[in-house]
Amino acid sequence: MDTKTQPQRNTAFKKEVFEGLTASPKYLSSKYFYDKTGDKLFQDIMAMPSYYLTGCELDIISNNTFTIGELFRDRENGLDLIELGAGDGKKTKVLLKYMAENNFNFVYKPIDISENAVELLSNNLALEMPLLKVDAEVGEYFEVLERLKGYNKRKKVIMVLGSNIGNLPHTKAIDFLSQLKDTMLSEDLLFMGFDQKKNPQTVLDAYNDETGITAAFNKNILTRINRELGGNFEVEKFNHWETYNPETGTAKSFLVASEAMEVTIEQLQLQINFEQWETIHTEISQKYDDKTVSWLAEKAGLKIETSFTDANEYYKNYVFRK
Ligand code: AVJ
């Protein structure tokens, strides 16, 4: 595992928190949800029936393992399977097991922004699949893209599951996709999950559970600022608020101050004021349709080769080529 970039990431965290909380309106980046507590809360989210995304993608991968696996295969030189945002690897393991059992020659390279997630996944794979070649790394998407160019000695398959791309607004998603394209050669594949537009209530329910798990997940970013940057947010005075715009397909998460407050963040030498009902925008979870995905692909210079969906067409995994 590469821990050399840790201090740098902490600096990026500081810089972005400063920028976001001094902006108007205030915002924070959802990529900072994922510390140890955030990872655990996200696991709890994935286990909630209302958070349909995980189950749908698991169904898609389980029902199409052979087709997907054989698309990935290179009988001559094998392949590098690179996963951005690997998390707990639950869905990926279905493919890893197929590949391992069917004589694929491959290295699995999981990359995640959460050091904790990468460590848990590495340990788990060492136990469950001891013969698998794993080369894990900590890093964030845009930071690791450059290094992916070094993986051009044989076929590479890049996976981004979980509709993780949905955290990026379209402009950034196009940037991300076109930078991925720049790392690809003609035989390489990009396998990516996109949550689809559906009944707006179903989307809203996925991000607004009554048990408060999503609220806790959203608020964890404030707890993290308290712990890592010496903040004194009174976390319970913020409300989780979710919106979904069925026209644009954008689900948005906010933290709303339930009263006027003054917050200090020691390490940033920053004092911030909240008016009552002032917001911090924390996350977008974009929903897609075929037309939008085709448009993103075209803008990024990628071609859609095929796609897989579940019985309800709630979710789709697309295979892209350069
Ligand atoms: C992991 C980014 C795909 O946006 O659906 C879950 C994170 N946020 N519940 C998503 C999340 C609130 C999730 N992604």
Image (spheres, rainbow, N blue to C red):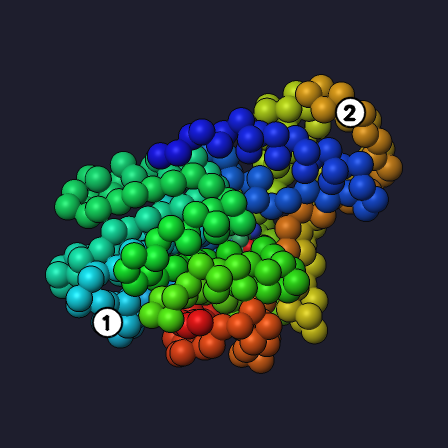
State whether residue 8 is above or below residue 192. above
Q: Residue at x 67, y 56 (%)?
A: 252
The numbered dot on residue 250 is none
State whether residue 46 is above or below residue 297. above
178 sits to left or right of 222: left
Q: Is residue 53 visible?
A: no
SS category of the residue bearing label 1 = helix
| Of pointers 1 and 2, the one earlier in the residue sequence | 1
Asked whether 63 or 214 is in front, the reply is 63
Q: Residue at x 18, y 58 (%)?
A: 105
- In percent of width and height, residue 293 lies at 55, 74
51 sits to left or right of 273: left
- In percent of width and height, residue 110 lies at 36, 47
SS category of the residue bearing label 2 = strand
The numbered dot on residue 270 is 2
Q: Find disc 1 in the rendering and name its residue.
A: 70
Q: Marks 2 and 1: in contact by CB < 8 Å?
A: no
Q: Amino acid at mark 1?
A: Glu
99 sits to left or right of 191: left
State whether residue 90 is above or below residue 185. above
Asked whether 164 or 256 is in front, the reply is 164
Q: Quadrant of the N terminus?
A: top left
Callout 1 environment at 10 Å: few (<14), some (14 to 19), or many (20+)? Answer: some
Nearest to viewer (mark 1 / mark 2): 1
